[in-house]
Amino acid sequence: MQLSITLTLIALSLGLALLVGFRRDLVQSRAGKILAFVALAILPVLSLWGGFEEHLDRATSTEFCLSCHVMKDFGQSLKYDDPGYIPARHYQNNFVPRDHACYTCHTDYAMFGGVKAKIRGLRHIYVQYLGTIPVPKDIKLYTPFSNTTCLHCHLGARRFEEVNAHHKTPDLLMKVKSGETSCISSGCHDIVHEVGDLKGAKFWRESR
């Protein structure tokens, strides 16, 4: 819907700009000057903003994240037919929105988390077209995965608060909530994308 509105604004802006350009006599009147201002200033700004918003939204989609060849294996890892793989389990069970899965789990939920994610995304685009593209096994997170991302959805949920594994030691849950113990530390949810396991793996087939 937003794309169609943006395209309509662009078409209207071009149409009015051409009208003003070919009919300069129109701008002699007060109404004509207002029309010219709308055609040459207001509508182009609205069109630019609409296009910017459209591309920002698209940049958060799973399809966009996986459009780079180097990310293909990470996308494939979301289809592991094994609930032990945490990203696959979340993706397949709709614990995260599938069309925004990457952005949901890899964006900091702090005040400027989205801004940082967009800046890093620009860097990825630069590397894709002008830099040296790494092999999948060499791709690492910029910073250690934050428990805040997990707690954004799971904190307070009964299946999180009461699961036996989170009470193996009296203070484990407290350490997880404070960030002292990572959710993906060894012995916890430490099986993530594991792109090295793709060969010979069994995959889940998404229903259509």
Image: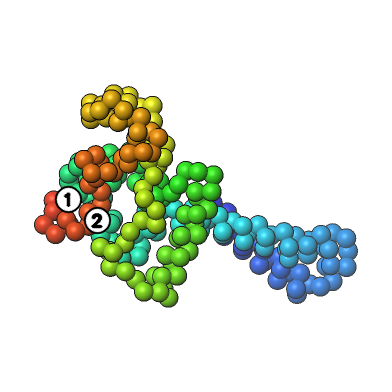
- Name which residue type carries label 1: Phe
Q: Quadrant of residue 152?
A: top left
Image-based side of 140 in relation to 206, left or right = right
Front residue of 182/15: it is 182
Identified at 73% across, 65% down, the residue is: 40
Q: Secondary structure at mark 2?
A: helix
* Residue 125 sits in quarter: bottom left
Q: Quadrant of residue 178?
A: top left
- Residue 36 at x, y = what percent? 78, 64
Instruction: Say whether marks 1 and 2 touch (CB < 8 Å).
Output: yes
In the figure, 158 relative to 95: above or below? Answer: above
User: In the rendered structure, which amino acid carries the disc numbered 2?
Assistant: Gln
Q: Nearer the viewer, residue 13 or 111?
A: 111
> In x, y percent, where is residue 4?
54, 55
Q: Is residue 130 left or right of residue 35?
A: left
- Residue lying furthest left in this view? 200
Task: Name the mark on residue 192.
Answer: none
For disc 2, the marked residue is 76
Quick check: 26 left or right of 16? right
Q: CA distance from mark 1 to mark 2?
A: 8 Å
Residue 163 seen in render = no
Q: Nearer the viewer, residue 100 or 113?
A: 113
Answer whether residue 113 is visible to the viewer in this image. Answer: yes
Q: Which mark is residue 203?
A: 1
**Mark 1 / mark 2, whichever is N-terminal:** 2
Q: Nearer the viewer, residue 138 or 129?
A: 138
- Please determine whether, in this image, residue 113 is positioned above or below residue 140: above
Q: Position of residue 3 (x, y in %)?
A: 52, 55
The colour scheme is rainbow
* Residue at (19% x, 59% y) in the render: 196
Q: Pinpoint residue 127: horizontal percent, then vertical percent.
A: 41, 70
